[in-house]
Image: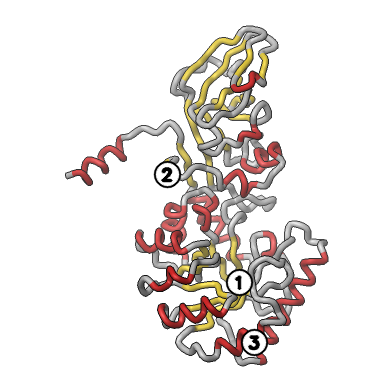
Amino acid sequence: MLDTLLKIFKKDYRTLNLIEISKTNLINNFKYLSSLNRRIKIAPVIKSNAYGHGIIELAKILDPLGAPFFCVDSLYEAYELLKVHIKTPILIIGYTDPQNYMVKKLPFSYAVYDIETVKILSKYQPGCGVHIFVDTGMHREGISLEDLPNFLTAMKQFKNLKIEGLMSHLASTDDKNDPLNRIQIKNFKKALTICKKYKVYPQWIHIQNSDGLAFNLPGCRLNMARIGLALYGISSDPNLKPVLTLKSKIIQIKKLRRGDRVGYGGTFTAKKDMLMGILPIGYYDGVDRRLSNKGYVLVEGVVCPIIGRVSMNIATVDLSKVANPYIGQKVLVYSNNPKDPNSIENAAKICQTIPYDILVHLAAPIRRVVV
């Protein structure tokens, strides 16, 4: 009875803020990226709540498309997908406390770079796939080239594990002229040579990310790319369309007199009489505080500046140019049109940060709907 009531409540409950996910854009982005090189399969990166888009919503859309893996960061994220019966294989690319692998047998694959994790996987997750993560020059996680031979030798004793992949991560693909790219590609080739020498032949070879997909990497035998941001349409490629919009509503309208100050610290002062709208959305919800007095929203297509400081759950905007604004009127907080001043990319530029930073701070409790 309680479950039934909760379902009814969830269906009829009207949210003030809403994230819409374009199913068409997401599928088209996946198909387009898959067409760029038929030899390379696209493995969607849906970690960190699918970059704020909603891990469950995104996984359900992408599940029928035949990706080799969904890439997640944690065991928790993998469990979330398991609970909703996602069929696409799941690759956990982040670190997990090995103790957590002892609880029960799991149907996942794992990125590995330390022998202690390998030992526990062998004992408690026999038969699982592992992807050897090599540090090719980014100097974060991963096993060094110098240690790779000993690592491969040690892995020979764990015959109940399937060496499924060899992987690394490119550090500077947003700057194609950075010499670090050439160094990493060269080192990845060395890692492949070492694997061959030790008679290790992984099925999946992957190092590319969204920007790196355009790189020509001869001799690497790549057949998979882990793609996140481009999949969500945040890209200079006009063939890729943004997937996400964030919407809110006007909950109050106020007349400001010249000289009135707005918000915490009174950082905005009205230079003339004007109309202000109050929105039930703030930096907790994902409207970056750095957009205070700098960012924009759209109301009926009209650009409305954010005025005053963005609060935890409140933002205030200038409605002076909106004809006949009203309570309950829809507000486009983040647009899926890259040209709009409130697109994710333009909001990131205003904040002097990267689009990832804006996206991943979209609050998980905001309802996501697929349209």
Q: Earlier in the sequence, mark 2 or mark 1?
A: 1
Q: Residue at x 65, y 60 (%)?
A: 210
- Vertical comparison of 335 with 253: above or below: below
Foreground disc of the pair 2, 1? 2
Question: From where the camera sits, is residue 270 visible?
Answer: yes
Residue sitting farthest toward the left: 1
For label 2, the SS is strand
Residue that badge 2 annotates: 369
Q: Reading the chain from its start, which is encountered first: label 1 or label 3?
A: 1
Q: Quadrant of residue 222?
A: bottom right
Is 9 positioned to the left or the right of 337 in the image?
left
Q: Which residue is mark 3?
A: 150
Verify CB contact (< 8 Å) between mark 2 and mark 3: no
Asked if disc 1 and disc 3 are in contact, CB closer than 8 Å, the reply is no
Q: Nearer the viewer, mark 2 or mark 3?
A: 3
Residue beneath the point at 52% across and 48% down? 52
Left or right: residue 158 versus residue 264 is left
Q: Residue under circle 1?
A: 40
Badge 3 amino acid: Asn
| Circle 1: element type | loop
- The quadrant of the rendering that contains the C terminus is top left
